[in-house]
Image (cartoon, rainbow, N blue to C red):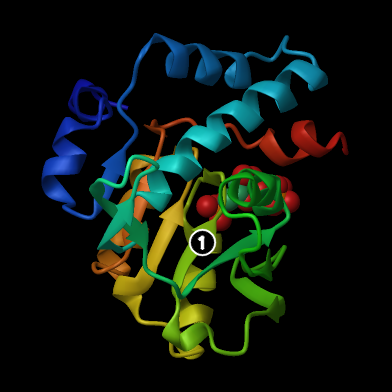
């Protein structure tokens, strides 16, 4: 990896190049969570606790990408407040299994949101991504979809999931990809294949923490 690549992983150039990529504004708290999640010495309970905190931050910012409408409410003192409310017609879709770790964070913000699931597996020989299982709300074509998957290495898993959503007539511009860690290659793969999709991540870095699912769920 050359220095040129290191220069752009801070994100500024990526955000300039891919207008639909948003990287969570990094502060010390976020950097600490990322550090705990990448540290091989982190215990499983600390890992899950920190992952849930980072997930919540990413989900909150992803929800910010959904459409709002203006509204007025009357306060207890009878004054009118000019506010905002979400447009209805949103849903979540988690990619099994790491994406399921993000479902609770979404439910904590949107109590009764519908959440579909999709399972994509890579063929051991050809590495081709294949869909094993998919269940979505029946009217998903009319909805904005928050697609949840925490780790993107090659971007193949997410690309396959987006392809399946589009086969179900979801508009590409209505898909918001919610992610924790992403490699530069995955940004390129996903956003060049699906330029209208909106993507939100906490970090673009050449090393993907591929241990995420195993450590979060405590499996080998
Ligand atoms: O961008 P990709 O190259 O497609 O890879 C995405 C993720 O999928 C793999 O994990 P795993 O197969 O363990 O998935 P899981 O944690 O969801 O079970 C891989 O280790 C990455 O973490």
Q: Nearer the viewer, residue 77 or 23?
A: 77
Image quarter hosting the N terminus: top left
- In the image, 150 versus 159, the foreground residue is 150
Residue at 88 percent of width and 38 percent of height:
219
Quadrant including the C terminus: top right
Which residue in the rendered view is the most extreme toward the front?
Answer: 77
- Dividing the picture into quarters, in which one does residue 198 lie? bottom left
* Quadrant housing residue 203: top left
| Residue 59 on image: x %, y % | 49, 44
Q: Is residue 22 left or right of residue 220?
A: left
Q: Residue at x 59, y 20 (%)?
A: 38
Decide if residue 208 is in sight here.
no
Name the residue: 76% across, 34% down.
Answer: 216
The crowd level at tag 1 (other Cα within 10 Å; few <14, some 14-19, many 20+) is many
Farthest residue, direction left: 16
**Vertical order, 22 against 46 (above or below):** below
Q: Which is more toward the observer, 137 or 214?
A: 137
* On screen, residue 218 above or below 112: above
Residue position marked by numbered label 1 in the rendering: 147
- In the image: residue 71, left or right of residue 45: left
User: Residue at image x 34%, y 42%?
Assistant: 184
Q: Is residue 110 visible?
A: yes
Q: Is 110 placed above or below 171 here?
A: above
Q: Position of residue 188 (x, y in %)?
A: 30, 53
Q: Is residue 36 left or right of residue 19?
A: right
Residue 29 percent across, percent down from the top left? 45, 13
């Amino acid at each position: 990896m050359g220095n040129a690549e290191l220069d752009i992983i801070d994100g500024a150039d990526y955000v300039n190049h891919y207008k639909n990529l948003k990287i969570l504004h990094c502060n010390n708290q976020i950097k600490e969570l990322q550090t705990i999640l990448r540290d091989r010495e982190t215990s499983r309970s600390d890992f899950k606790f920190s992952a849930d905190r980072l997930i919540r931050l990413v989900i909150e910012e992803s929800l910010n990408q959904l459409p709002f409408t203006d509204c007025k409410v009357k306060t207890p003192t009878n004054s009118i407040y000019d506010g905002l409310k979400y447009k209805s017609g949103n849903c979540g879709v988690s990619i099994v299994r790491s994406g399921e770790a993000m479902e609770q964070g979404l439910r904590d913000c949107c109590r009764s949101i519908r959440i579909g699931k999709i399972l994509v597996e890579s063929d051991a020989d050809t590495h081709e991504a294949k869909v094993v299982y998919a269940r979505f709300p029946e009217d998903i074509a009319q909805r904005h979809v928050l697609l949840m998957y925490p780790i993107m290495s090659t971007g193949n898993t997410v690309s396959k999931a987006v392809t399946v959503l589009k086969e179900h007539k979801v508009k590409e511009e209505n898909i918001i990809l919610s992610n924790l860690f992403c490699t530069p290659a995955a940004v390129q793969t996903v956003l060049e294949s699906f330029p209208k999709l909106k993507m939100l991540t906490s970090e673009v870095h050449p090393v993907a923490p591929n241990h995420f699912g195993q450590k979060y769920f405590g499996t080998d």
